[in-house]
Amino acid sequence: MQYNKLPHSSLEVSQIALGTMTFGEQNTEQDAFSQLDYALERGINFIDTAEMYPVPPKAQSQGLTETYIGNWLKQSGKREKVILATKVAGPRSVPYIRDNMRLDWRNIHQAIDDSLQRLQTDYVDLYQIHWPQRQTNCFGQLNYPYPDQQQEVTLVETLEALAELVRAGKVRYIGVSNETPWGVMSLLKLAEKHELPRIVSIQNPYNLLNRSFEVGLSEISHFEGVQLLAYSPLAFGCLSGKYLDGAKPTGARCSLYERFVRYFTPQGIAATQAYVSLAREHGLDPAQMALAFVNQRPFVASNIIGATSLTQLKSNIDSLDITLSPELLDGLQAIGIQYSNPCP
């Protein structure tokens, strides 16, 4: 396993991270324990979760993912062996978590205390804003209608609330998720101006069907040292090829939940077919090729994989053993040009 030090921090995260959003929905607590045990055996030290997990989010299951991880940490006694990351939910879509959800002092302090209780730990290593307070184009929508007025909580208020968590020892470092270039640079400038904690990471989607991070955000990663924790590296599993030709494998996420349609556009399906065919031409598993591509991007600090079985988890981790040849990289580039960001 390779480990990468997040700039402006002391955190050394494994190249592969264990994503956990299926814990409590597609995975039982025993499944979760087995995945966590196996991940650590393979050298993974970075575990990513969120207060709103599992996904799809539901009022009756919210918090189960953190609870499962907390029970595992208590039973295994391995808290000091892992870098634990979680997230505070933003103001939209999940009102059942807290009344009047905002990224203000009250919500952030209540969120971390609730997460720490579920996780059965005194601190988290990385605390991330799951999505921005403001209404913004997080998911690559074309012709996005920006509102004339934004919500009342400012970025500096959010940073000040997070700073108190760092001072209290509940959080070691802070990061963002589903953020834009404007948001990242604004947070960096405000942190410097007001002597507040600097964000050390950004967790955004990144995969062969969605390379929008390379436009704008990768430059910030390069010059400002805010590296990517890449989520959805297999595009909800689409890049494995298992959904091609209209297939709906039993138990697969996109078979179970109709909401996951982002990567099923006509261009997305055509691009997926091209990537799967290229992998097979080179004798590679399509999913492992797609993961290897993410693993080897210079701005990626850790590739957050999720799995619903140990077999799938093993195969995903084994992507570390694959080095993409110049010929294969040329083929990926050609497809990327032909189908330029089909699912941003």
Image (tube, rainbow, N blue to C red):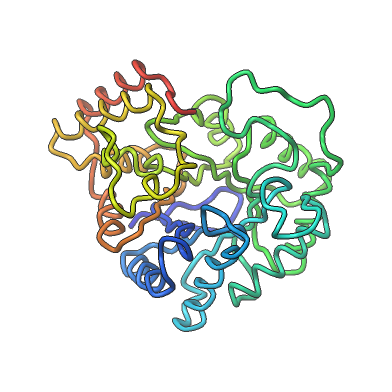
What residue is rendered at 51% in x and 31% in y?
213
Residue 300 against residue 168 in the figure, above or below: above
**Horizontal placement of 9 versus 92: left or right?**
left
| Residue 185 horizontal/vertical position (percent) | 69, 34
Extreme residue in the top direction: 338
Q: Quadrant of residue 41?
A: bottom left
What residue is rendered at 40% in x and 37% in y?
297
| Residue 282 horizontal/vertical position (percent) | 14, 33
**Horizontal placement of 6 versus 171: left or right?**
left
Residue 269 against residue 6 in the figure, above or below: above
What residue is rendered at 31% in x and 64% in y?
42
Who is closer to the viewer here, 237 or 124? Answer: 237
Who is closer to the viewer here, 319 or 52? Answer: 52
Q: Quadrant of residue 180?
A: top right
What residue is rendered at 31% in x and 58% in y?
313
Who is closer to the viewer here, 272 or 167? Answer: 272
